Image: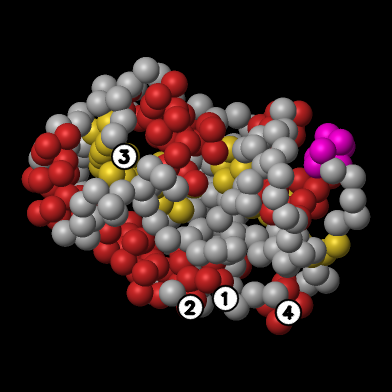
Amino acid sequence: MHFVVIGGSGFIGREIVNEIHRRGQRVPVVVRQSCYLYDHGSLSRNLSLISPDAVINSAGYVGRPNVDACESNKSECLAANAVLPGVIASACRMNALPWGHVSSGCIYSSANSNSSSFSELDTPNFTFRNGPCSFYSGTKALGEEVLRDCQDCYIWRIRIPFSNRDCQKNYLTKLMNYDRLLEATNSLSNLDEFVSATVDCFQKQVPFGTYNLTNPGAISTSEVVDLIRQSGVMDREFKFFRSEQEFMSLAAKTPRSNCVLDTSKASDAGLVMSPIRESLKKALQTWVTQDHQSSSLQFPVAA
């Protein structure tokens, strides 16, 4: 199968490209330098020249070092997370191409609901329509709204990605390097398992639609910290904010999404991801360290 990956040079996009390569398949990468992504005509012509079997969009704006940066770069965040998905949908429709879009589970918040977990049928409640929310979450929810009536499309929701590879965007790396942590219970996504599931959607001909691609179960920040210490990867004293109110007053510019996603739809479709504790233990057992300067920033729990 011949894929095209839009945003293939990013954190998630690189891993999708690597997964496709591991399966022995072709995968050109479409980035801003190759065509004007925000013009459906330009993108459509580019796709026509490449002539793929399917398109995967992993482009988006998250902000560095965290989603607080989106509050200062709203135009770029809105364009990448809400406008671009619609442009890609139009270009794929013009070329009769199936495609998939990497979205986020950060469009839900347990604080705004009595629900213990959220399925794909639940209306997002951490959005501009159901605030307060972060600008990042608001734009990701708008992106899904744009694709609501889109045919031949997958929407994949990722939550707080981690892997066994030490890097600044890895949730485990963040926990090990930030000065203080916020205690919260969340769904997480093993990045390797997530990207494998996205490609499986096409190869297994899974029905089009929205899928929560997180590892089954939920886990708290302190539980993850305990697993880090037990693994021997790092044995340090981890400090926590006394409350979310203290976190908001001292470390954050915008509210955070903390939630648990129901993964039964993905499981029923044959998209297999291992239980969260099992997946975390395996990542820590095979931990690959990279040299980078540790940070003393305070950690906000968000994807």
The amino acid at mark 2 is Ser
> Under tag 1, what secondary structure?
loop
CA gap, disc 3 and disc 1: 33 Å
- Residue position for label 1: 254
Given residues 49 and 1, the one toward you in this image is 49
CA gap, disc 2 and disc 1: 11 Å
The amino acid at mark 3 is Val
| Image position of 260 (left or right of 14) | right
- Closer to viewer: mark 3 or mark 1: 3
CA gap, disc 2 and disc 4: 18 Å
Percent across and percent down for residue 140 are 40, 61
Q: Main secondary structure of the magenta part?
A: helix
> In the image, is residue 247 above or below residue 25?
below
Residue at figure coordinates x 17%, y 34% from the top left: 50
| Image position of 70 (left or right of 20) | right
CA gap, disc 3 and disc 4: 40 Å
Percent across and percent down for residue 263 are 51, 39
- Residue position for label 4: 250
Considering every residue shown, the one lying at the far bottom of the view is: 249
The amino acid at mark 1 is Thr
| Image position of 163 (left or right of 144) | right
- Closer to viewer: mark 2 or mark 1: 2
Which quadrant holds the C terminus? Answer: bottom right
First to last magenta residue range = 227-233
Given residues 230 and 46, the one toward you in this image is 46
The amino acid at mark 4 is Leu
